Image (cartoon, rainbow, N blue to C red):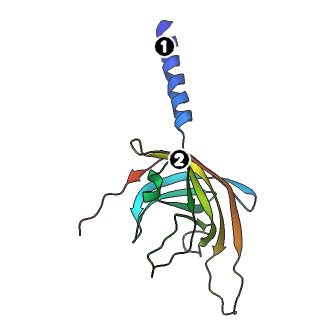
Amino acid sequence: MKRCILRISIILAALFYYNVQAQVFTFKVDGKFMNGKITEAVIVNLGEADYLQIRAEAEDKIVYLYCKEALLKGELPVKLKFREHNHEKGETPDSEIIWVPDGPDRPQWNSIKGETVVTQHDTENKTISGTFEFVVEKFQYSSKANAKRPSAEITSGVFSNVQYRVEEKKEG
C-alpha cells in the first residue's frame, strides 16, 4: 500500500511539474483565438544581429516571433519595438512577427508596427516568457499604384516557459 501511494505521489508530482513548465504560445488574429504549438525556439544569426526565433504552428498556420538577443540582457521587463529594416544604416527591428496563414509556399504577412515585452528570461536554463502585439501586412505585389495591402491585427499574444537553444556558429 505504501509503495502504491509513493508511486501515485511521484506520478502526480511529475504531472504537476510538467504542467507548471509547459510551453505556451497563444494569440488572437483579428479577434480569433489561436493556440500555437512551439515547433522550434533557437538563437539564429540574421545578418546584422542574433535573434531568438520562436516558430509556432496553429491550425496549419505558422507564426515566427523574433526578439533581438542583445536586448534580452537588460533589466526586466524589456520592451522590444518593431521598426523598419534599414540595411543601409544597419538597423533591424528589436522584435517582429511574421504570420504565414496560407502555408509556406504562399505570401507571408510582415510586421508594420508592434512590440514584444519580455517579462522573464533565464539565460542559464534558456527559457523566456512575455507578451506581444503586432499589425501585419500581406506581402504581395500589385500593378496598381498605391494599392493597399491586406492587414491583420495580432493581439493578446503570450509566450511562456519557452525553452530555446543556441544554434552552433559555423566556421567558415
The image shows residue 108 at horizontal and vertical percentages of 59, 72
Q: Is residue 64 above or below residue 163?
A: below
Q: Quadrant of residue 61?
A: bottom right
Residue beneath the point at 46% across and 10% down: 3
Residue beneath the point at 54% across and 40% down: 22
Q: As drawn, which residue projects farthest toward the front?
A: 75
Q: Which residue is mark 2?
A: 76
Q: As drawn, which residue projects farthest toward the top?
A: 1
Element on which disc 1 rests: helix
- Rounded to the nearest whole Å, what is the CA distance between mark 1 and mark 2? 40 Å
Q: Is residue 126 above or below residue 144?
A: above
Q: Which residue is mark 1?
A: 6
Disc 2 crowd rating (10 Å Cα; few below 14, some 14-19, many 20+) is: few
Q: Earlier in the sequence, mark 1 or mark 2?
A: 1
Residue beneath the point at 52% across and 12% down: 5
Identify the amino acid type marked 1.
Leu
Disc 1 crowd rating (10 Å Cα; few below 14, some 14-19, many 20+) is: few
Identify the amino acid type marked 2.
Leu
- Where's the C terminus, which quadrant? bottom left
Q: As drawn, which residue projects farthest toward the right?
A: 31
Residue beneath the point at 52% across and 37% down: 21
Foreground: disc 1 or disc 2 = 2
The image shows residue 85 at horizontal and vertical percentages of 51, 75
How many dots with numbers?
Answer: 2
Q: Are marks 1 and 2 in contact (CB under 8 Å)?
A: no
